[in-house]
Image (cartoon, helix red, strand yellow):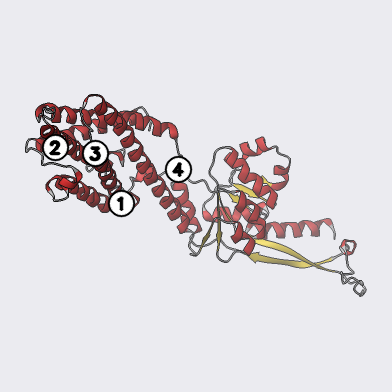
Amino acid sequence: MDPQHVEDLKKEYERLSADGFRVLAIAIKDVAARGNAADGTTPYGKADECDLILNGYVAFLDPPKETATAAIKDLQGHGVLVKVLTGDNDLVARKICKEVGLSTEFVLLGDELEKMTDQQLADAAEKTTLFARVSPAHKQRIVKALQSRKHTVGYMGDGINDAPSLHAADVGISVDTAVDIAKESADMILLEKSLLVLDEGVLEGRRVFSNIIKYVRMGASSNFGNMFSVLGASVFVPFLPMLPVQILANNLLYDVSQTAIPTDAVDPERIAAPRQWNIKDLTWFVILIGPCSSIFDYTTYFMMLYLFHCWDTSTPTAAAHSASVFQTGWFVESLLTQTLIIHVIRTNKIPLLQSRSSWPVLVMSLLIMAIGIAIPFSPVGPYLGFSKLPMLYWPLLAATLLCYVLLTQGAKMWLLHRKWI
């Protein structure tokens, strides 16, 4: 071909590519017929691939899914960076990215990537949105480069070339129409055609993570505070502050109250951006919030000992009655404070006013608190070693609960102000 003809063909190829078409050149050559080799292999080889006559181009259009643009916008709105890794040329890839709303300011080609060290690739991958003309090995390197920068990487693909990257990613995602090796390498397979399920999955995962954090905070801070309470009571109380069967009943009721936590609502700002597990934040929370319960456990001790005369151990009967009243008072206070504080710990806002729990959590909390109040008056009470409490106990308990909630909320807001949680 003359140079001008070659130039025209290149321009046609670039025009089709820029319109989003994948372009395949078709060429022919007349050769003498040859018989198959004895081992059945083809008699034609690379040496024959010369002096071909170009017949034209075949252009394939593979438009993005209708939901791609909305899905990418939703993901970006929730702090998820979307990057494209493709074996197609950069012209086709730029066109597709433009259609779905992705910036192509930073593009990296496979031959450029090949010359980079892992450190250079990690630097480039941070800002690059489009990687074009990349091989399966390149895709895997890009995934690992992003992971080296502490990113949690999800990779979506459906072809044979995507298998290494699906396996290397933190979350490999494929579709039910993908090739078998892609589905086997993926962690999850999308059964719906809409890509909007990706954002829904991200948000649901963040809700689950947030509720797990709530549960860990509640359990760790409660147990940490109870440890101080039991330790202090064992020093100066002349009897067991709570019988083993009462401790078991307390723990059982408290654990039941937390079974509704997976259904709890999550504040929008808690799922607006990715969050990581941070043991330092949990440590500060437990250290400062846990002992708050111990303060009011001690006030309950002194209230039971001095106001309701549970020091009286002058006779075996008096000692047994004093122990039973003391244990009942602490059981009810401990159960109610632990259950009520769920609603303070579950949110960084003001509970009930700025953020409300789901109705299963609220109903379960009220139910467990009602059971805790009713047990001393029920036929089951004597079997657990409980006694009826004096009437003055209940308004004092209400004041204790109010002060506990205020103190814990204040401690929580102080931690938030210091950005320690």
Q: Secondary structure at mark 2?
A: helix
Q: Quadrant of the N terminus?
A: bottom right
**Label annotation for residue 274:** 4
Q: Earlier in the sequence, mark 3 or mark 2?
A: 3
- For the point 30% across and 46% down, the residue is 255
Judging by the rendered image, the residue that carries numbered circle 3 is 243
- For the point 50% across and 62% down, the residue is 66
Disc 4 residue type? Pro
Within 10 angstroms of label 2, few (less than 14), some, or many (20 or more) residues? Answer: few
In the foreground, 55 or 162: 162
Q: CA distance from mark 3 to mark 2?
A: 24 Å
User: Would you say residue 217 is visible in this rendering?
Assistant: yes
Disc 2 residue type? Ala
In the foreground, 343 or 195: 343
In the foreground, 177 or 397: 397
Judging by the rendered image, the residue that carries numbered circle 2 is 398
Judging by the rendered image, the residue that carries numbered circle 1 is 260
- Are discs 4 and 3 less than 8 Å apart at CB? no
Q: Secondary structure at mark 3?
A: loop
Q: Quadrant of the C terminus?
A: top left
Q: Secondary structure at mark 1?
A: loop
In the foreground, 28 or 166: 166
Disc 3 residue type? Leu
